[in-house]
Amino acid sequence: MYLVKFGGSVLTNKETIKSQKGKKIFYRDRTARLLSELGPIGEEFILVHGAGSFGHPLAKKYKLKDGYKKESQIPIVAKVHEDVRALNLSIIRAMGEIGIPAASLPPSSLVEFSKGFLKELNTRPFRHHLEMGVVPVTFGDVVPDTSRKFGICSGDDLMMHLAKEFKPRIAIFVTKVDGIYTGDPKAGPSEFIPEINENTIRLIQDSKDDVPDVTGRMKRKAKMMLSIAKGGVDCVVLNGLERNRLRKAIEGRKVKLTIGRGKK
Ligand code: IP8
């Protein structure tokens, strides 16, 4: 089996330009094309997706990641939950349209956080659906936190825990860039890192841009890759805007990407 995450910036207008501010746009055609690269391979998989513009701007504005501070956050918790569910439903529908049976597994009812960290993930519904031949689809969400009332569970947190539990042959992060760079390639000179390990991770510098991301950037992603790789699972970051890169990576063909090699 394999595990794949579609980043929110691939699926939505997360990196909002001024004229789109406040709008939540789901890129239907791009998502359908990415889904079609998963479909025909005939191997079990779990799909995770990010929240993009459906989750990050409000979560950031109301500081949901730090947990409960004031009562005015509560309706926002419900609103973010509603919005990420709406995005999830669009993805489930797009899967149905191309003949991939899929079921939504919302973290708000499967995950428990404590002090801002994932403590428990109920994986039984994932196993059940896989056994039935239905693809489990989960996503970045607002979740209960035993000490802070609520917290933000990112798709990356879910990838890490699902990789540990299911030991897929590969974990794939689909993003808008070719892989991990030493810095933001849009902001200045930076180098592509084909393989993440203890040495190359030190070269990464996160840039401060105005993307409303509450769950971290490339350095965090690289740390997660290393942690997944330490658990014995190959882990890659690749560019979902390039047609067929995802399909070829799943098929084990050579494409441009960054890999963290699973420790065997
Ligand atoms: O987009 C974030 O998940 P991510 C979830 O996978 C929310 O980082 C609600 C902002």
Image (cartoon, helix red, strand yellow):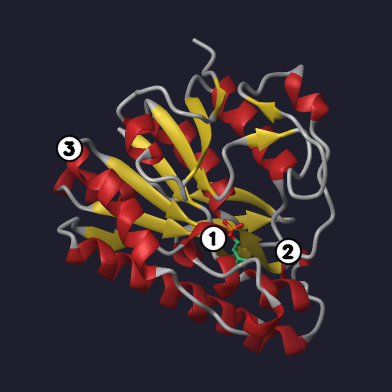
Residue type at mark 1 is Gly
> Which residue appears at 54% of the width and 53% of the height?
155
**Left or right, residue 115 beside residue 144:** right
C-alpha separation, residue under disc 3 versus residue under disc 2: 36 Å
Residue where numbered disc 2 is placed: 211
- Residue 16 point in image, percent of width and height: 65, 72
Q: Quadrant of residue 224?
A: top right
Q: Nearer the viewer, residue 140 or 254?
A: 254
Residue where numbered disc 3 is placed: 42
C-alpha separation, residue under disc 1 versus residue under disc 3: 25 Å
Residue 167 can be seen, yes or no:
no
Q: Nearer the viewer, residue 68 or 219?
A: 219
Residue type at mark 3 is Gly
> Which residue appears at 54% of the width and 79% of the height?
24
Classify 10 Å Cα crowding around label 2: few (below 14), some (14-19), many (20 and above): some
**Left or right, residue 11 beside residue 135:** right
